[in-house]
Amino acid sequence: MINPGSFRLMIKGWHEKYLEILKEFHYDRIKEIQAANVLDWLLEKKSQPYSIRKKISGKAVFVIGAGPSLDSAISHIKKFKNITKIVADGSAQALLEHDIVPDIIVTDLDGDIDSLRKASELGSIMVVHAHGDNIPRLPYSTLFQNCIGTTEDKQVGMVKNFGGFTDGDRCVFLAEHFGAKKIILIGMDFGTKIGRYSKQVVSDRSTKIRKLEKAKSLLEWLASNTNAKLYTTTYPIKGFENMRISDLRRIIS
Ligand SMILES: Nc1ncnc2c1ncn2[C@@H]1O[C@H](COP(=O)(O)OP(=O)(O)OP(=O)(O)O)[C@@H](O)[C@H]1O
Ligand SMILES: Nc1nc2c(c(=O)[nH]1)N=C(CO)CN2
Ligand SMILES: [Mg+2]
């Protein structure tokens, strides 16, 4: 059966959430819009999100973040060759080191570009996010074979808005947008301990932690606005069912 969520244009209420983000993190909206326009200009007009829909609609999917629990989760992830893996930025490197190719990578290009490029060559679909602070890095998107863009602001051409803020929560918003039946979080620990595959900028630690708090609150908001079944294998998130990572097989069946 087709999940009606897969045809929804934009999650209702996102714009208000976005305005809150701009205020809380002191982002300049003009720069956000400029970034979306630059990315649209860089992307090939022929890339389309159809291949993403095919990988997600009606399925159980993993969303893989770069929290501290990722290391111990990898041996479990590896057992599921045919499950769609939507991977947040730095986590892609961890998976590639264990010969797991992400299906979809959600990135704002602030991590290791070589890993992203390698994943793209191996077939990963890249979902590149444009924001006011990554404009100089956006040209890296031209290295990728299959790539679409995202923005938190108004959609423009090839640059879509599926909702979400950090790479990790944007993976969940993407999965929800394209009608996933079940979304299972792995390595999405949140809290104050930053995972080793996440961008390590010690001077900006407090912003990173505030971003993680915001990401978690956005997921709790999403949980109250979706029909998808949501699970977490790490710490509790309101609206997500807690599960053990050793129970993956039972949950996806
Ligand atoms: N404890 C954690 N440490 C690191 N990442 C986490 C944690 N818990 C959840 N995540 C998710 O994993 C994602 C991947 O992290 P990564 O640092 O590679 O991306 P990022 O969002 O671009 O970081 P930043 O917001 O600092 O630019 C994060 O976006 C976040 O949503
Ligand atoms: N302007 C701006 N926007 C963002 C930023 C950021 O650092 N600056 N980071 C994000 C996810 O980490 C998402 N959006
Ligand atoms: Mg990133």
Image (spheres, helix red, strand yellow):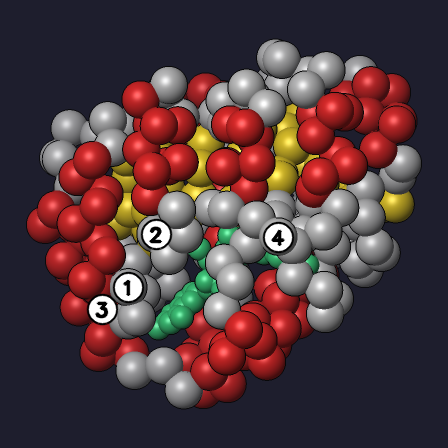
- Label 4 crowd bin: few (<14), some (14–19), many (20+), radius 10 Å: some
Secondary structure, mark 3, is helix
**Relative side of 185 to 96, left or right:** right
Q: Which residue is mark 3?
A: 33
Q: Which residue is mark 4?
A: 196
Residue at image location 22% in from the left, 69% down from the top: 33
Secondary structure, mark 4, is loop
Q: Nearer the viewer, mark 2 or mark 3?
A: 2
**Which of pointers 2 and 3 lies earlier in the amino acid sequence?**
3
Which one is nearer the viewer's eye here, 230 or 79? 79
Q: CA distance from mark 4 to mark 2?
A: 17 Å
Vertical placement of residue 190 versus 149, above or below: below
Which part of the image, by quadrant, shows the N terminus? Answer: top right
Q: Which residue is mark 1?
A: 134
The reply to whether the C-beta atoms of the residues labelled 4 and 3 are less than 8 Å apart is no
Q: Quadrant of ligand 3?
A: bottom left
Q: Is residue 112 visible?
A: yes
